[in-house]
Amino acid sequence: MLAVAASSCQFRLRSAMAPYESKIVPSVWITWLAKLMADELQCHWSALFRSHYTYGKVPSNFDSAQWSARHRRLLNQRVTWLEEEGCEVHVEGENWFEMPGRQHAIRVAGKPDIVAIRGNDAWVEDCKTGKPKNADLYQVLLYMLLVPLSVERCQGLRLEGRLVYADGIIDVPASQVNVEFKAQLREAISILSNTTSARRVPSFQECRFCDIPLQCCPERVENPPDQSLENHDLF
Ligand code: SF4
């Protein structure tokens, strides 16, 4: 069970003076929450750990400078287009929010790329440089649910969503923020609040994209499994 796994990890970490600290209030960033809800995160324990602790991260081999440049270009193009359409446009830090829950002691934080407002209509947009993923959709749906509740300038407006890719735009209608979606959100928050079990799923496939170091997760798999099998006559 996660509760046991989490507390035993806690003990090991404290005794080893590992580079981690409990957050004063647990918090989850919308990008992880979206991956969890979209079932694109097998190791739920990693999301739980990130929500409860700050830690020294494993350096990423992902080229963040290139990603930032591509993302900035896409975002700037979009802002120009929206302004030409007569929208009042707010970007990134201007849209930051952190919402506390009542049933669980956890905050949900996010920063939509773009919030565009024209009259009583508003659009929350996220710019994506990669291929479309289900988590992208969940991310925008979470913004559509939480932005009107936490960003004052959006309260009372009709809000729709859009996913902006280099080769096209996907509209996300408000009707998708429905009862089922809210139930999925509550389930994910419950996992991250450590009120239900969350599995640690160590595998090279998952761990190589995880920034939690070995000192915090002793089960981290750093190398691919040995697959040097003989050719088989099955096929
Ligand atoms: S290193 Fe692997 S097992 Fe450990 S939290 Fe990350 S994904 Fe899970």
Image (cartoon, rainbow, N blue to C red):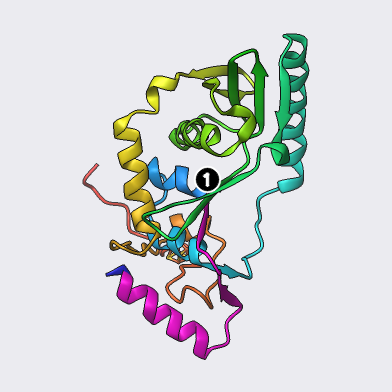
Relative placement, left or right, of 141 versus 151 is left
Tell me where residue 66 appears, x and y as whole percent: 75, 41
Question: Circle 1 — which element?
Answer: helix
Q: Is residue 227 magenta?
A: no
In the rendered view, would you say 58 is above or below 218? above
Establish whether ligand 1 lies closer than 8 Å to the Cβ of label 1. no
Tell me where residue 137 appears, x and y as whole percent: 47, 31
Q: Is residue 25 magenta?
A: yes
Quarter of the image with the C terminus in it: top left
Tell me if residue 128 can be seen: no
**How many neighbours does mark 1 have within 10 angstroms: few (below 14), some (14-19), or many (20 or more)?**
many
Tell me where residue 21 appears, x and y as whole percent: 57, 75
In the rendered view, would you say 142 is above or below 164? below
Q: Which residues are magenta?
A: 3-30
Tell me the residue at 45%/61% (across/down): 46
Residue 103: quadrant of the picture: bottom left
Identified by mark 1, the residue type is: Ile
Tell me the residue at 45%/56% (across/down): 206
Relative placement, left or right, of 235 versus 138 is left
Where is ligand 1, by quadrant? bottom left
Which residue is farthest bottom? 15
Badge 1 is on which residue? 30
Which residue is farthest left? 234
| Along the line of sight, the residue nearer the viewer: 160 or 78 | 160
| Along the line of sight, the residue nearer the viewer: 95 or 229 | 95
Residue 57: quadrant of the picture: bottom right
Which residue is farthest top? 85
Tell me where residue 166 appears, x and y as whole percent: 65, 23
Tell me if residue 3 can be seen: yes
Tell me the residue at 66%/37% (across/down): 95
Tell me the residue at 42%/73% (across/down): 219
